[in-house]
Amino acid sequence: MPETPAAPYGATPTPDEPPPFFRSRWVEVPDSVIRVHSRGLPRGFRAAGVHAGIKPSGRHDVALLTCDAPDAVSAARFTRSGTAAPPVLVTRETSRLEALRTVVVTSGNANAGTGRDGFDVARQVRSAAAEATGVDDDRVAIAATGVIGVPLPMDVVPAGVALAGRELRADGDDAFRQGIETTDLFPKTATLRVALSGGSVTLHAVCKGAGMIQPSFATMLCFVTTDAVLEPRTADLLLGVTVKRSFDRITVDGQLSTSDTAVLIASGASGVRVEPESADEQRFGLALDALLRQLALLIVADGEGARRVGRVVVKGPDGPACERVARQIGNSPLVKTALYGGDPNWGRIVQAVGAVLPGPRLTPIGVRIEGVEVCRDGQEAPFDRAALEALVQGPEVDYEVTIGSPTVDGGAGAAAGAFANESELYFSDLGHEYVTLNAEYTT
């Protein structure tokens, strides 16, 4: 890991002037967002992070978040891995996902690949968190992140959870954030003030992730809290939609985590109600969408040694084909190393496209890099290479790929000359630091 990591998106943070949270040109901040802070929990929540002894470094490794409202509403999403970790399975199968009040996280150890004992351990951690926060076991979500295949050290974890319970504070969000991180080089958190018709509400989110990131959905943990009044179906709908547009749309290394967890909890402490299918639901949803999309991009920007973030939009007549092509491009080592080196090598993009299209046949392919057409109908288009090389040196590089021919008659809901489907994916580059960090991960 570099001793002095580069700041995300090329910013140069200082203690007095941290980089702004919304820093990507690909995230549109809605008018409903009236204030952005670097931290701060909504009303009705307390949090803590402590060192229990999982991490030999002495950094926080147990984190606890709780909602004091007995009628809290929640929603959750989890990894789709076929080898999901016991904390995911115990939470998903035995907790009340619409009424969670507490989240407990262990970092430095994923409690994954630990067999039947891992399930017993997950239940013990959940019971310790329930006792520490005074809630029922089935209103606790468990999450874990870190090394796979190593038993969680239960000689220290229960005491760590109890200590975190005693440390719970309304301003404990920063300690909680530290307690969920592993290889993260910088914080990924923000607090928004959102204007609704009945008043303003607070929306806070914190996440971690830098490697083992791949759509489905991205090692990624995210915890969202709000003091808005939400109905369970509203919370579930909004979290589901925004996760699909954020954490489902990123890749660092194409590796699917065993432990991905995203939880939204609403305390209702503001008294401001978000009615289903209302303008307020749309305003709140847009704010949540912007928040999670920027957090997802920060994960990609962290990328365990990444220099740049790429976005690829693939357009074509076949939706599933667009999705396959986007993922193939974002996970291609050749495309990713070219992004790292600031090399606008469009040939690497074309070869990635061909890897997932049926063949052999000639498919019209077009490529634009930073809006500059470099490939038309599968062959190079005239462009100023020196000018393009300068454009791709920035922290974000935009790619557009078209496969097949656009709609001619405007059928299938598409205008003439347009493509009926598109798929968007954000991806990191691939450089020396990624190999170094992952080669030495358990040592």
Image: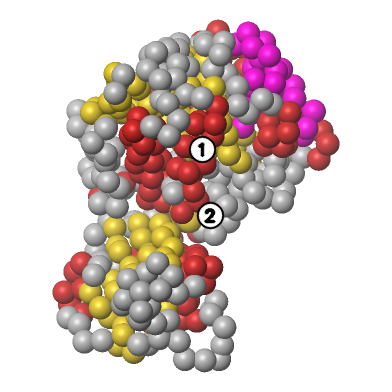
Query: Image point 25% across, 51% down: which residue?
Result: 25
Residue 337, image x and y in percent?
41, 68
Find disc 1 in the rendering and name its residue. Answer: 237
Q: Which mark is residue 253?
A: none
- Of residue 386 and residue 443, the one placed in the foreground of this image is 386
Residue 404, by quadrant, is bottom left
Residue 34, by quadrant, is top left
- 184 sits to left or right of 155: left
Mark 2, other Cα within 10 Å: few <14 / some 14–19 / many ≥20: many
- Of residue 38 and residue 32, the one placed in the foreground of this image is 32
- 383 sits to left or right of 154: left
Residue 153, image x and y in percent?
71, 28
Residue 389, image x and y in percent?
22, 72
Residue placed farthest to the right in the image?
116
Q: Is 268 in the magenta?
A: no
Identify the mark nearer the N-term, 2 or 1: 2
Q: Is 131 in the magenta?
A: yes
The type of residue carrying mark 2 is: Pro
Q: Is residue 375 above or below residue 362?
A: above
Find disc 2 in the rendering and name its residue. Answer: 215
Q: Secondary structure at mark 2?
A: loop
- Of residue 29 and residue 65, the one placed in the foreground of this image is 29
